[in-house]
Image: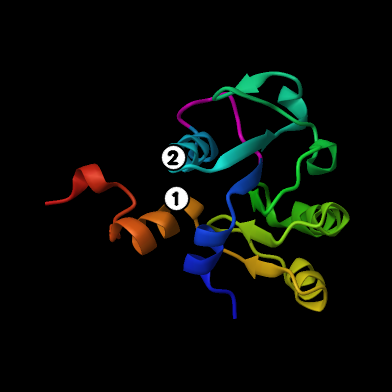
Amino acid sequence: MTNIKEILLKYKKIAMIGVSNDSTKASTIVMKYMQQYGYKVYPVNPKAKGQKILGEIVFEKITDIKDSIDIVDVFRPSNEVPAIAKDVLKIGAKVLWLQLGIKSDEAKKLMMSNNIDYVENKCTKMEYQTHFLKVRQAFPALQD
């Protein structure tokens, strides 16, 4: 079973697929948050290739990133995940992480059969808050 706390402690390089230049989008908010907590985030978005998002150059696909990647964090529709999972194998990432609402049985089987951690339907930012900051709300500013 995948231990989320262990993943977030051990792995610090994240390729984030689906990050946008729109600072109000969930993917961009999560990228900025993870950067603030010491993670190196590589934004991946074919439409923004070569641009900068939050100070990082945007890659067209994860296979274009020259550095080693620990976690591939996906903000894309579930039907795109099997192809992403194949790229995860090509680059030797340790974890395929699917954000809230995203699942893929095909990708899960592929990851399990290749000893790669698989997380689905969970937000990296919310999990970080839960495990390290003991914050359970998605929006801490709304706490009583």
Q: Which residue is mark 2?
A: 33
Disc 2 from disc 1: Cα separation: 7 Å
Q: Which residue is mark 1?
A: 125
Amino acid carrying label 2: it is Tyr
58 shown above or below 14: above
Query: Residue 17's quadrant in the figure?
Result: top right
> Callout 1: helix, strand or loop?
helix
Q: Are marks 2 and 1 in contact (CB under 8 Å)?
A: yes
**Is 137 displayed left or right of 128 in the figure?**
left
Q: Amino acid at mark 1?
A: Lys
Q: Is residue 18 magenta?
A: yes
Q: Is residue 130 left or right of residue 47?
A: left
- Residue pictured at 75% horizontal, 76% vertical: 112
Q: What range of the chain is rendered magenta?
A: 17-24
Residue 94 is situated, as x and y percent measured from the top left of the image, at 71, 61
Seen from this angle, which residue lies furthest bottom? 1
Q: Position of residue 70 (x, y in %)?
A: 68, 54
* Lower sequence index among marks 2 and 1: 2
Q: Residue at x 44, y 50 (%)?
A: 125
Dot 1, how many residues are within 10 Å of its Cα: few (below 14), some (14-19), or many (20+)?
some
Give the residue displayed 49% in from the left and 55% down from the top: 123
Q: Nearer the viewer, residue 2 or 126?
A: 2
- In the rendering, at what x and y percent does residue 11 appear? 59, 56
- Secondary structure that dominates the magenta span: loop
Tell me the quarter of the picture where residue 81 sits.
Answer: bottom right
Asked whether residue 75 is in view, the answer is: no
